Amino acid sequence: MRILRSIGLMKRELSAHRRKGRTVGFVPTMGCLHEGHLSLVRRARKETDISVVSIFVNPAQFGPKEDYLRYPRDMKRDASLCRKAGVSYIFYPDAKSMYPAGYSTYVRVRGLTENLCGRSRPSHFEGVTTVVAKLLNIIRPDRMYLGQKDAQQAIVLKRMSGDLDMDTDIVIMPTVREKDGLAMSSRNRYLSADERSAAPTIYRALQEAGVLIKSGNGDAAGIISGIRSKIRPIAAKIDYVSVVDTKELKDMKNIKGEALIAVAAWVGKTRLIDNIIVRR
Ligand code: PAF
C-alpha cells in the first residue's frame, strides 16, 4: 500500500494502472475509519483491481460553527486499517493543494440538497459535491462506494455523477451498525458513556416506524410524531424527522412506494443521523 499526498502523482499512478487495463475502486472518506468504511473497501477490493481510499477532512463541507477543527483525525490507525484491508493506495492530500489560493469553483446540486440536512447545514452539500467532483477527476474510478447511512449524500452524489456525465458507477452499501443498532460513525466517539447507551433509541424508533409502515400505516405525520416522541427523551435537540421519497427527497404526506425515513438529532453535543428505507 502506498500513501500519496500529491494530486499529480496520484493521477500518474492511476493512469499507469488504467493503461494496463486495471479497474479502479474508490472509497472517499474523512478518515477515522470504522467498520462501515471497511465494508466499502472490501466491496471495492472484490469488484475492482486497484482500491483507493481518500482521507481528507474537507473544510468546505463544514459550517462556521461546526466541528472542522475538532473532527477526529488518526492517520496512523487509518493507515494500519487500510493496510490490513489490502487497500492499494491512500490518497491523503492537504487542504492547500485541494483548495489553493484563488480557488473559486463549486459544484451545486439543486433541489435534492434543500431538504433534510440541507435545511440546517445550508452550505454542506456544496462542499461535499465540490470535493467529490475534484476527487473523481483526480482518481477517475470505475466505481465509487458510499454508505447508506449518509443517504442524502449518496443520492446527491449519484445525481451529480449522472448530471455531469461522469464515468463512475456509484455503489451504495448498507449502513453498518454496532451490536445495539447504533449506526457506525466517526462522530460516535464524541458521545459520553450515558449518551452512547441512549443513542440506539434513534434506530429503534426508526425500526418501529418501519414496522408500522409495512403493516399499512401511510400517515407520514403520525409516523413522524411517533418517532419524535420516542427520541425526545434522549435528544438534546431534534434537527428533523422526515419521511421523503427516495428520488427527489420531497416530503411525503401519504407514504406510498419507497420512502426514506430519516432522522438528525443531537445527543448531548453530538449530531447523529440515521435512516431506513421502507416500502409500502
Ligand atoms: O462521507 C464523508 O465522509 C464525506 O462527506 C466525503 C464523501 C468523504 C466527502 O468529504
Image (cartoon, grey):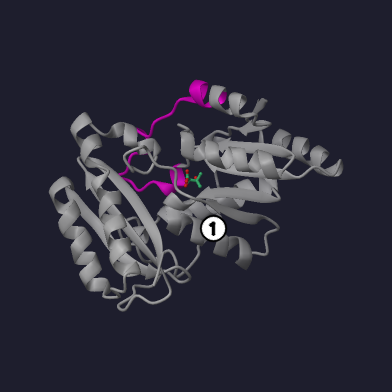
**Residue 86 place in picture, x, y as percent:** 65, 29
* Circle 1: residue type: Leu
Whether residue 200 is situated above or below residue 163 in the rendered picture: above
- The residue depicted at 21 percent of the width and 40 percent of the height is 198
Within the magenta stretch, is there residue 23? no
- The residue depicted at 50 percent of the width and 65 percent of the height is 109
Give the residue number, with chain letter if any, for mark 1. 157
The residue furthest left is 233
Asked whether mark 1 lies closer than 8 Å to ligand 1, one says yes
The residue furthest right is 20
Residue 199 in sight here: yes
Whether residue 155 is situated above or below residue 257 in the rendered picture: above
First to last magenta residue range: 59-79
Nearer to me, 73 or 37? 37
- The residue depicted at 53 percent of the width and 56 percent of the height is 106
Nearer to me, 41 or 2? 41
